[in-house]
Image (cartoon, rainbow, N blue to C red):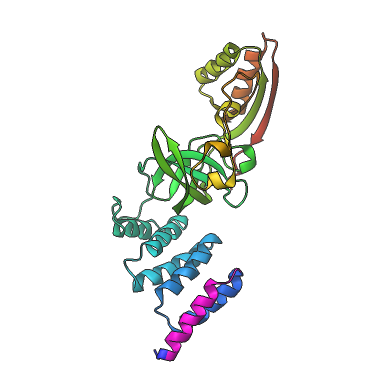
Amino acid sequence: MSEANRQRAEQLHDEAQSLNDEDEALRLYHEAVSLDPERPETLYNIGLIHKYRGEWAESMAFNRRATEFAPEDEAANWNLAIAATALRDWQTARATWKRLGLPIDNGDTEIEADFGMTPVRLNPDDAGEVVWGQRIDPVRVRIGNIPYPSSGFRCGDVVLHDGAATGMRKYQGREYGVFNVLELFAPSENSTLEAEVQVSADADLQELCAALDERGVEYEDWTSNVRILCKQCSEGRPHEHHDTTLKDSWTDRHVLGIATVDPDNARAVLENWASDKRVLLRFEKGLSPPAMH
């Protein structure tokens, strides 16, 4: 490769990095690679654009090439493993995680281990709801909370998330990085239901919660347990003066999120609870699992 080609490739790479137009950036990156096929930073950037577009085969191919010329590049290896996971290429994913020093053995079976709890941000380019879940590999989480139906996600969904944290959350004195969700990996069988109840005393609400527990119905009190954060706090460390804080005082109206594979069972619990009380009850179906083909 001539020095002139190398310099021109570097110039094209820098020009592409300064662009907001992804298609034009890709065109310049590809031109740079045609002049200097062994530029790992350019190959990585091409793979990065394809990652955020969900174009996994292209992302995997270019990140693989980037790691061939820069085997120790942590970011390229992470994105290679993310793309391999999205494509269910467990052999590549396992080998890449192992190369990064993570406790994962080689093989060709799906990874399902215990990597601890973590918060993830659903729809990061939109409303950005943050929920908690159990990480089953370095970039997949099974959602444990009950997301709002408007999010399009359900309790129990397995989601694929990015490798770099954007923001922090604290739980029991420990800080956890928040990872942006890239896509739904495997849907839950749960439906999300929403119940609004108006009660005169906290004891009535506690009685409803006990009845739901007894029938094995997962629920969350969205009124008491959900904080609304501004974008600055959500993508950083939440600060008290930016929060719409949780209410300490009693409120008679509560909205419950319910996750269940049997909506009729959940409805029966609520209607039975309400039958001998002077309470307001609004119960509606919020989100069903996607149809399986």
Locate residue 270 relative to residue 92 in the image: left or right.
Answer: right
Answer above or below: position of 141 versus 62: above
> Looking at the picture, how far across and down is residue 290, in whole percent?
60, 43
Q: Nearer the viewer, residue 252 or 212?
A: 252
Answer above or below: position of 233 versus 91: above
> Looking at the picture, how far across and down is residue 123, in whole percent?
58, 48
> Looking at the picture, how far across and down is residue 76, in whole percent?
40, 64
Q: Which residue is drawn at 50% across and 17% down?
A: 214
Q: In which quarter of the image is residue 136?
A: top left
Q: In which quarter of the image is the N terminus?
A: bottom left
Residue 278 magenta-drawn?
A: no
Locate residue 173 relative to residue 228 in the image: left or right.
Answer: left
Which span of residues is magenta-colored? Answer: 4-20
Q: Is residue 261 visible?
A: no
How many numbered badges does the structure rendering display? 0
Q: Identify the residue at the far top of this view.
A: 276
Answer above or below: position of 256 versus 62: above
> Looking at the picture, how far across and down is residue 113, in whole percent?
35, 43
Answer above or below: position of 20 versus 149: below
Residue 11 magenta-drawn?
A: yes
Q: Main secondary structure of the magenta part?
A: helix
Q: Which residue is drawn at 55% across and 29% down?
A: 225
Locate residue 219 relative to residue 79 in the image: left or right.
Answer: right
Q: Can residue 194 be seen in this view?
A: yes
Q: Residue at x 67, y 32 (%)?
A: 285
